[in-house]
């Protein structure tokens, strides 16, 4: 890594985003942290604390990064040699307007980030964070064959079954190429989610994977960072086992 190299992180206030920011700061990078509202202390206080904990000389600057505001994204990308794009609307609950609530921000947001990276002039590499939702469900994938980087979620299937988050993540990743979940379970969520799969992986591993593909000049294409993929109901059962004092539903979909 070059001395005092600067990188941009969208979605920096989130769980993965802030973990990545911490690792980048610890590694000696200066970070342009993109958040939706820089004036919201809930989005920024922990980021400033991470910068302070990283020691003298570790610089963090906070930028407003509305994914649909190209000018704001370009402002954050200027002076950066790398961009980590993590920000994306995330929900598995039913939405009234999937196009505007999920698809447009995810797809157009990704395109806007890539455009900003190009127009900024000095960006040499972009790392786009996707999801296992972009590879599953894929009913056409050969039975018994482990899904890998070649596998894509079946858009038509998802649209027919209302799996709009999977649609948005798949289209967003494809555009790049052309867990609250645990909290909801602990709160006693009883909703049934057909064909929702969870790819469990430690947040520290995800953050480090971002940095490794950025720093390795030979890295290209898709990279899966997943220990295993489980159905929502199997995840709920495991959480219920680990946290028996919480009202975790034992079954979230009819067997």
Image (cartoon, rainbow, N blue to C red):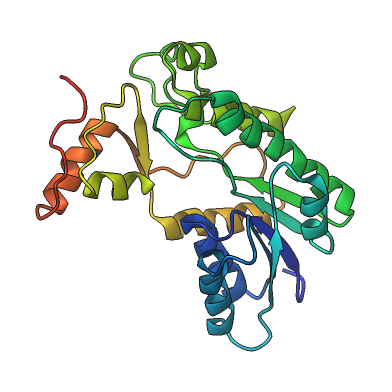
Q: Is residue 69 above or below residue 108?
A: below
In percent of width and height, residue 97 lies at 54, 25
Q: Is residue 181 left or right of residue 105?
A: left
Point 18% across, 43% down: residue: 238
Point 40% across, 33% down: residue: 92
- Whether residue 57 is visible: yes
- The quarter of the picture where the N terminus appears is bottom right
User: In the figure, residue 100 lies in which quadrant?
Assistant: top right
In percent of width and height, residue 247 lies at 14, 47
Q: Is residue 252 left or right of residue 98?
A: left
User: In the figure, residue 221 lies in which quadrant?
Assistant: top right
- Whether residue 216 is visible: no
Point 48% across, 25% down: residue: 96
Q: Is residue 57 left or right of residue 137?
A: right
Point 15% across, 54% down: residue: 243
In percent of width and height, residue 234 lies at 21, 34
Farthest residue toward the left?
244
In percent of width and height, residue 18 lies at 52, 63
């Amino acid at each position: 890594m070059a001395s005092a190299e600067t990188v941009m992180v969208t979605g920096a206030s989130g769980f993965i985003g802030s973990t990545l920011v911490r690792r980048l700061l610890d590694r000696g990078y200066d970070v342009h942290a993109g958040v939706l509202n820089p004036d919201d202390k809930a989005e920024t206080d922990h980021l400033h604390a991470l910068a302070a904990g990283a020691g003298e000389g570790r610089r963090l600057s906070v930028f407003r990064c509305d994914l649909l505001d190209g000018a704001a994204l370009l402002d954050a990308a200027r002076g950066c040699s790398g961009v980590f794009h993590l920000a994306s609307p995330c929900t598995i609950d039913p939405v009234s307007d999937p196009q505007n609530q999920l698809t447009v921000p995810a797809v157009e947001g990704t395109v806007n980030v890539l455009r900003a990276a190009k127009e900024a002039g000095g960006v040499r590499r972009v790392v786009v964070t996707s999801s296992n939702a972009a590879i599953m469900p894929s009913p056409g994938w050969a039975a018994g064959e482990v899904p890998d980087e070649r596998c894509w979620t079946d858009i038509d299937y998802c649209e027919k079954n209302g799996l709009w988050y999977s649609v948005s993540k798949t289209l967003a990743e494809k555009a790049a190429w052309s867990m609250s979940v645990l909290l909801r379970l602990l709160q006693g969520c009883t909703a049934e989610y057909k064909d929702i799969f969870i790819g469990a992986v430690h947040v520290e591993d995800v953050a480090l994977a971002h940095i490794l593909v950025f720093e390795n000049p030979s890295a290209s294409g898709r990279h899966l960072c997943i220990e295993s993929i489980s159905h929502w109901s199997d995840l709920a059962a495991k959480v219920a086992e680990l946290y028996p004092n919480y009202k975790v539903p034992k079954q979230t979909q009819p067997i």
